[in-house]
Image: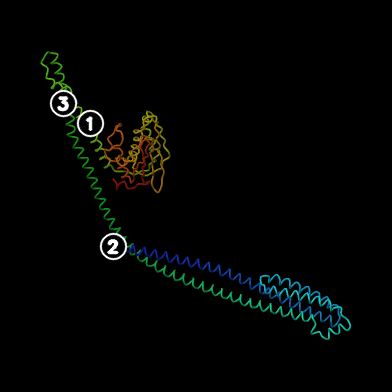
Amino acid sequence: MESTKMAAFGRDARSSRLIIVMLSLGFAALLAAAAATFWIQRQNEASAKLVAHTLAVEASLGGFASANERMETARRGLLLTGNMEFAGLVEETQKVALSRAAELAALIADNPRQRERVARLRTMLDGYTRHYKQTIGLTGAARSAMLADFSNDRGVTYVRGMRELVQSMLDEELALLRSREAEQRTTQRLFTAALVGTGLLILLVAGVTLWLVRRNLAELRVSRAELRVLNEDLEVVVDARTAELKRANAEIQRFAYIVSHDLRSPLVNVMGFTAELETARSAIARYLVKSEESGWEAPDPTTRLAIEEDLPEAIGFIRTSTQKMDRLINAILNLSRQGRRTLTPEPLDLTALVNSIAGTVQHRIQETGTTLTIDPLPTIVNDRVAVEQILSNLVENALKYLQPGRPGVIEVRGRSEHGRAIVEVVDNGRGVDPRDHERIFDLFRRSGAQDQPGEGIGLAHARALAYRLGGTIEISSALGEGSTFRLSLPTEWLNGDENA
């Protein structure tokens, strides 16, 4: 099963990489198509501007040619008929021709050959105008000679020259127009080819991606079915292991209760006989005093030392040890009883709960001059007795381990995040060495100077209760810098019966 899962995972990874590669190619193709479209559009705009420019030049050349022909026609009418109305028409068409020539000069400013032709047109037009002014006043024989040889007249020569120049300019503009139209067609073909190529590439990418996705989905369905079977098996195993752990925990608690209960019987006997030994020792001591007063023979020094010093010291050690053992047995019994207690979830206002705890230790707060601040705390659903025991232990520990010579400051603050309530008890006490952060949660283990009463049970009991309530306790501390105990509990814990 494990090798099959690993192989399937490898195929999924390769498929994912292929999908990413294909999607990247698709996006790259779209970007390339967008770039090509932008470039081709710019090219089309440039070509369209050039075509429009060529058409404008052709229109201007046509206007100049028309004005040139009308001007020559009006001049001939004037020469043949002498009607002065033709003179006004000549002057009017001359103005139109000059205007068209100026317009042409502006339009073909970027073409050296056309600029040269326009300059020649202007020269011919100026020559034609001078010749017209010279011939308009001819009379008699001079006028008859000019009309007889009119085909060789200089004005006709100017007109023919301007006609040829206009035609050559039109030919060049037509060649430019054909070239630019060919460029537009080429650009259009490139645009079409780019769109077709991009479309085909996108279709290919989409097809391969869909195929990979479908294959992945099929593999995921198979994997999901396998995972469902594994989960079902795992749930059975977990339930079985949980039941075993519960039974083992119950057995351990019963064993602890029985052992501690059975230990109390011989301990009570030891404590009773110790009391009898103390009574006997007192009687012997009184007898010695009485013997000395009555003049009887006193015992030897060794016996006297044993009766007056060694025996009381031994009895004192026995009594101290039995008292400590009694406290430990009582603590074990208490832990056993707490572990067997059924937990009952209920809504808890942690702010009110901590205020109640503060009231029970108010005398200690006043004696030590400690400042206790309780910020607003969240509301949870949990076992009241267990939560109260945990928080009481944390607050009492903060009061117990204050730094000598420094006014105590304790702050209880809290918040809710991700379905859990976080309560922090912060103090400025003596602190805990980082090496002992986990050690202080062990049963019967303590850290630092042992100058305060206690058996090292409180924090172990608090963490065990927190685990039962679905929470944790952590510490952040350094020597001489105070401590922060952080309690994390679910905001709504509804498994009291299952965790009992």
Q: CA distance from mark 2 to mark 3?
A: 74 Å
User: Can you identify the residue that label 2 sits on?
Assistant: 3
Q: Amino acid at mark 3?
A: Leu
Q: Amino acid at mark 1?
A: Gln
Say whether disc 2 or disc 3 marks the residue closer to the N-terminus. 2
188 or 232, nearer to the observer? 188
Left or right of 185? Residue 322 is: left
Q: Position of residue 256 (x, y in %)?
A: 22, 41
Q: Position of residue 240 (x, y in %)?
A: 25, 53
Left or right of 134? Residue 289 is: left
- Secondary structure type for disc 2: helix
In the rendered image, the quadrant that contains the C terminus is top left
Q: Residue at x 24, y 50 (%)?
A: 244
- Mark 2 neighbour density, 10 Å: few (under 14) some (14–19) many (20 or more): few
Say whether disc 1 or disc 3 marks the residue closer to the N-terminus. 3
- Mark 3 neighbour density, 10 Å: few (under 14) some (14–19) many (20 or more): some
- Secondary structure type for disc 3: helix
Whether residues under marks 1 and 3 lie with C-beta atoms below 8 angstroms apart, the answer is no
User: Can you identify the residue that label 3 sits on?
Assistant: 277
Q: How is the image coloured?
A: rainbow
Say whether disc 1 or disc 2 marks the residue closer to the N-terminus. 2
Q: Residue at x 82, y 85 (%)?
A: 149
343 or 76, nearer to the observer? 76
User: Can you identify the residue that label 1 sits on?
Assistant: 323
Q: How many marks?
A: 3
Q: CA distance from mark 1 to mark 2?
A: 61 Å
